[in-house]
Amino acid sequence: MLSSSESIKTSLAAIRNGEAGLNSHRKSLLDRVPNTGDWSAFRKNSITNKDIAYLSAATRDEFALLRGKKRDILFHGDKRHCEINDELLDLLKMKKLRLVAHTHPDYGHIQPSSDDRDFIKTIGQKDSVIISYITGAEKKFSANPFEDM
């Protein structure tokens, strides 16, 4: 497990530093959401948390993965946030989509922001995951900081 996490950390650094490129799957994902605010639907379970970490490493923007019964939604945020648009926000509030994960540029301990916690509270979701595009580490978080595991 340790060698695997070090390998991910090394490959994310290579992407961020321009020493390596995205694989064809991740390149095709980014081609569909090239700019901040872009989003696109994909086949369900065709996108992983690691995929969005690599997209963030390549662009240095945050990405969010939303999932519904039949599809995945990939959302391209900006350097600091994923400002989910009203159409997707409504689908999240109606429980037609779930926020699976989003990326952060965290080096050490992954820390959800108060905006992250407020957002999942607003959409009525119990928890979600943050993945660091620096280390590849993931952290589950909830609206209540005392419930984090």
Image: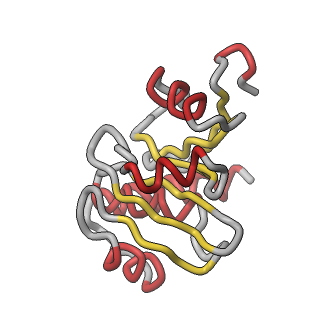
- Which residue occupies 54% across, 46% down? 131
In the image, residue 81 above or below residue 64: above
Q: Is residue 127 left or right of residue 18?
A: right
- Image x and y of residue 1, in percent: 74, 53
**Quadrant, the C terminus:** top right
Towards the viewer: 26 or 4: 26
Query: What is the total number of numbered labels drawn onto the structure image?
Result: 0
Q: With 113 as the anchor, is 44 left or right in this view?
A: right
Choose between 71 and 24: the one closer to the eye. 71
The residue lying toward the viewer, choosing from 133 and 45, is 45
Task: Give the image quarter of residue 127.
Answer: top right
**In the image, what residue occupies the spot 28% across and 59% down?**
59
Q: Looking at the picture, does residue 120 appear above or below residue 31?
A: above
Q: Is residue 56 above or below residue 125?
A: below
Q: Residue at x 71, y 24 (%)?
A: 148
- Residue 81 percent coordinates (x, y): 34, 40
- x and y percent of residue 39 in the render? 38, 65
Specify how the rendered protein is coloured.
secondary structure
Q: Quadrant of residue 58?
A: bottom left
Pinpoint residue 32: horizontal percent, then vertical percent.
34, 77
